[in-house]
Image (cartoon, rainbow, N blue to C red):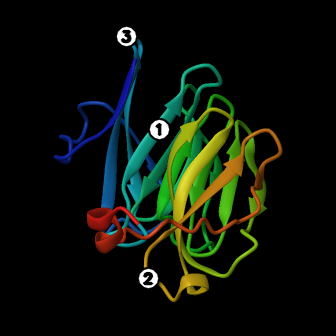
Amino acid sequence: MNIEILTITPTSGQFEEVHFGENFNYSLWVDFNISKGNHWVGCFSREYENGLDKVLYNDNDKTCCVIAGGKCYLLNFENKNLMFETDEYPIVQSLVQTSEYYFFGSFCSVYILGKNGLIKEIEPDIMVDGIYLEYQKGGKIIGKVDSAENQYKEPLDISIDIEKLEFDPYIEVKKPKFNFLKRIFRK
């Protein structure tokens, strides 16, 4: 089984084509090579030409989350049913997967998808201007946010508890400053 983004538009008629979305001026093509008898390509309408393109899938529950130009599609890749689509949601900026959920970060919140669609939307306890989820570490989703809390000097670290499906409370960690003179004179 293999699901991947195609860099070249496939030849029409070579495989079954399934279209998701409404406007196909900027399309993302994804190859779904599920089994010998189930090989098809999906054409996904992209929200923005330069937005995020990413594909993650869960073989156990037969779901696939496709981000096409910042627009999210959750589908069952066995029967080609669309279960969730971001129509009037903010543009998707990041996507991370666990064994049960897909987490996608937008401008100001994180959306959590399960095998049947949207489960929950969560927001951090600080004002943010972009959420960038990076990876899973243990029972946490780790990422960064741009925020006015530190005058946008550098992205702030955030984490999401996978069990509770909530942001962990934000605590700013002060990093010790390196003092060159103390280092030289050991005082």
Residue corresponding to mark 1: 56
Please state, as top left, top right, bottom left or bottom right, where the N terminus lies in the image.
top left
Q: Is residue 147 visible?
A: yes
> Residue at left 53%, top 45%?
96
Q: Nearer the viewer, mark 2 or mark 1?
A: 2
Q: Amino acid at mark 1?
A: Leu
Q: Is residue 33 above or below residue 31?
A: above
> Residue at left 59%, top 26%?
62
Q: Is residue 113 above or below residue 173?
A: above
Q: Amino acid at mark 2?
A: Lys
Give the Cα separation between the discs numbered 1 and 3.
Answer: 21 Å
* First in sequence: mark 2 vs mark 1: 1
Residue corresponding to mark 3: 36
> Residue at left 77%, top 62%?
169
Asked which secondary structure carries label 3, the reply is: loop
Asked which secondary structure carries label 1, the reply is: strand
- Extreme residue toward the right, this view: 164
